[in-house]
Image: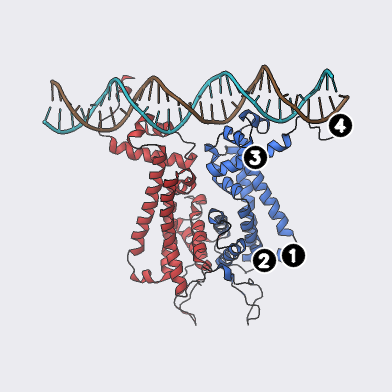
Chain colours: A blue, B red, C cyan, D brown
Amino acid sequence: MVATMARKTGSHAEITGPRIRAAALRLFARHGYAAVSMRQIAGEVGVQAGALYTYTPDKQALLFDLMRAHMEHLLETWAAERVSDGATDATDPVARLERFTRFHIRYHLDRPDEVFVSYMELRNLEQDNFRAIETLRRQYENELDDILAAGRTEGVFELPNTKVATRGLIAMLTGVSTWFRDGGTLSRGDVEDIYWDMLRRSVGVQCDDATAPGSTGRGAVCTSPSAARG
Amino acid sequence: MVATMARKTGSHAEITGPRIRAAALRLFARHGYAAVSMRQIAGEVGVQAGALYTYTPDKQALLFDLMRAHMEHLLETWAAERVSDGATDATDPVARLERFTRFHIRYHLDRPDEVFVSYMELRNLEQDNFRAIETLRRQYENELDDILAAGRTEGVFELPNTKVATRGLIAMLTGVSTWFRDGGTLSRGDVEDIYWDMLRRSVGVQCDDATAPGSTGRGAVCTSPSAARG
DNA sequence: CCTTGAATTGAACACCCGTTCAGTAGATGG
DNA sequence: CCATCTACTGAACGGGTGTTCAATTCAAGG
């Protein structure tokens, strides 16, 4: 209705909504969707249970919205990252793969709760919601599969099966968030280096000394992560 | 109604006990520990909820026993597998690693429910129970870590960090059970071959043509899994 | 000022939870 | 044939569940 936006009677709508989502995310991650009650979520926000229904039609929608938001943000963030600077990167499969690897680790370590919920609570989604999340997940997997397929076509990667490799590698990378904690002996950069080293090798990319005779100039530039040895 | 009231009683203890555990495992895997009620489990078995308490002190113990049984059986089965025939295998890290890889995949594909419950329901364990399972899990991880460490000491594996590699590789291997289904294009053997190929490369073991000049005779014997290409 | 209307309360609804336990059915040992 | 034992029933307990809704609160618009 007409001109002036922000017709805020009442007041806390723009605050309470996000706070509910944040509390739900935290609690779902810690205790699991089924084990968390609407009253617990409300209590965390400092509101009665009935108030939650101003912001979500029901508990299931609350879970689904959190998971969809996470998957969509993941896809958007990667879409932005993959095209940011570097026209060379866009065509070199090794560089693309390294970029994906480091992006995935960084993104997932920054959002442990979202990650945890998004792959632990799949079975608590109703059928339609499950299918929607699965579609988004498949889209993300295809991003990696495309890189692997391109690299194999160019003869840079050696892979018996890119679909299986995609699933295996994503499982490996996502697993980081189950054990990594800030403040340990390894920094996030160390972890990125270690995983990239393993992942690189797993698809058949050698460490390439560009000055060596017979260098194809296509291998990975390998730094030795001395701090990460162990 | 009179006939149904006459319930079979007597010495069905040895039947009902395992049936309860089987039903609980199935339901926990499908819907999650918190989402499954004792009445559902009882219904699956065909008894009243109260009857479950002849076989378990409470719901938590039911979950814990399932998880502990799974972890202990995993360790026992691997302990038997690792020493079965082949004194050469016991000293060759590549052979040991291949054996572990194929064992892990096979074992986990055979027990999807146990696997699912054992790593999805960790957060529903009470503190003491959690610690007990964590100990068993760490024991299993150490089995792989030992192999990797031995291989690196012998100069066969190239790894920046065996602890991180262990976690990464186990996450990759365990992930198989989230997507593999019998009756697809890939057989279990195909999957074993593909994963072994990737895993082998990831720790720096080359495919070794024993007849080639400069062969160390220590690389992996690589069969090309033609059926598994894709 | 008064009206408006969104944000929130608090009680209620119908149902489900894990667990306990007195009572019972039925096979078994004497 | 009876006493015993054990697996099991069925009802009950206190409390928690997701969700609804009339009533209330209270900042802002006119």
Count the labels in the image: 4
Q: Tell us which disc is closer to us: 3 or 1.
A: 3
* Residues tagged by mark 4 and mark 3 found on one chain of the structure: yes
Q: Residues within 10 Å of mark 4 (few under 14, many from 20)?
A: few
Q: Which residue is mark 3?
A: A21
Of residues B157 and A152, which is closer to you in this image?
B157
Q: Which residue is mark 4?
A: A2
Circle nearer the N terminus (4, 3) = 4
Circle nearer the N terminus (4, 2) = 4
- Left or right for A158, reference C23: right
Q: Are marks 2 and 3 in contact (CB under 8 Å)?
A: no
Q: Amino acid at mark 2?
A: Ala
**x%, y% of residue B160?**
54, 69
Q: Which residue is mark 2?
A: A95
Q: Are marks 1 and 2 in contact (CB under 8 Å)?
A: yes
Task: Name the element at disc 3.
Answer: helix
Q: Quadrant of the C terminus of chain B?
A: bottom right
